[in-house]
């Protein structure tokens, strides 16, 4: 909707209003690298794009070997992100892999060349949790599922700092829920990182909390809790 309003403003105001991104000194950025899977094999056909919240700056799909290399304009007022396999509004999103976004603070107002080298895109797994109430039960089940988010955001700083922060990379997220005695069977699906554990903590009525750790070594893992 925001983009629709912006296009309408461009149409109405015409030449008196510029909808093009302001470019400082005609600055350019270059992004290149190679996307690989967990076996270090190049992943073809993955969208890589540079953008700000308001402007698409450049993009390319990886070639047969997983390589990408493209140049993009740098707006003067925002720091671009280079997104690997982005989910939002992306018909080419590959749901078998996670998403990674690089925010490069060194690119604001300047020309920058970012060689990301080999970037491993983790494969995704689906965790299915089914909750089932036994016949004539009066038990209430409260639960929490903790799992790795499928999105990673990395912040890159100027080369002299040689620092990369990954605190926001595939961090754990939590889902809370409750299953009442008269509820129908419910199944919850969670997209997470293959090879990372899923933690389930649950309590029946006011009983002791029970804790489970499940390893997602396959693309799909199902688990059932009955009460």
Image: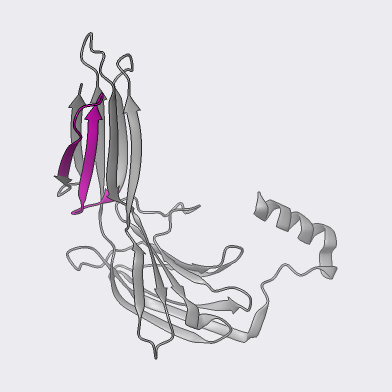
Counting labels gives: 0
Query: Magenta includes 204?
Result: yes
Q: Which of 162 and 22 is in front in this view?
A: 162
* Residue 158, horizontal then vertical, whole percent: 44, 86
Q: Residue at x 63, y 79 (%)?
A: 76
Q: Position of residue 68 (x, y in %)?
A: 38, 73
Vertical arrangement, residue 156 with respect to residue 5, above or below: below
Q: Image point 33% across, 54% down: which residue?
A: 150
Q: Which quarter of the figure has residue 85?
A: bottom left
Image position of 15 (left or right of 126) = right
Which residue ends up furthest to the bottom in the rendered image? 160
Q: Is residue 36 magenta?
A: no
Quarter that holds the C terminus = top left
Q: At which x and y percent is residue 136?
A: 23, 8
Picture layout, residue 172 above or below residue 63: above
Residue shown at 43% from the left, 58% from the top: 86
Q: Which residue is found at the position 34% from the left and 66% from the top?
A: 167
Specify the segment rendered in magenta.
Answer: 192-213
Residue 10 image point, x, y percent:
77, 61
């Amino acid at each position: 909707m925001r983009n629709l309003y912006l296009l309408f403003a461009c149409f109405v105001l015409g030449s008196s209003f510029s909808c093009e991104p302001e470019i400082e000194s005609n600055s350019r950025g270059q992004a290149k690298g190679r996307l690989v899977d967990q076996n270090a094999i190049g992943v073809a056909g993955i969208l890589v794009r540079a953008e700000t919240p308001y402007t698409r700056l450049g993009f390319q799909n990886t070639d047969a070997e997983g390589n990408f290399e493209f140049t993009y304009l740098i707006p003067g007022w925002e720091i671009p992100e280079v997104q690997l396999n982005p989910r939002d509004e992306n018909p080419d999103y590959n749901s078998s892999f996670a998403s990674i976004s690089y925010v490069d603070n060194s690119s604001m107002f300047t020309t920058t060349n970012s060689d990301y080298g080999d970037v491993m895109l983790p494969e995704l797994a689906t965790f299915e949790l089914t909750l089932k109430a036994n016949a004539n039960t009066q038990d209430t089940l409260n639960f929490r599922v903790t799992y790795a988010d499928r999105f990673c955001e990395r912040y890159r700083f100027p080369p002299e700092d040689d620092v990369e922060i990954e605190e926001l990379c595939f961090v754990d997220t939590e889902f809370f829920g409750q299953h009442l005695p008269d509820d129908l069977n419910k199944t919850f699906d969670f997209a997470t990182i293959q090879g990372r554990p899923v933690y389930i903590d649950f309590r029946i009525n006011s009983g002791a909390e029970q804790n489970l750790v499940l390893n997602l070594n396959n693309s799909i893992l199902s688990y059932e809790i009955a009460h």
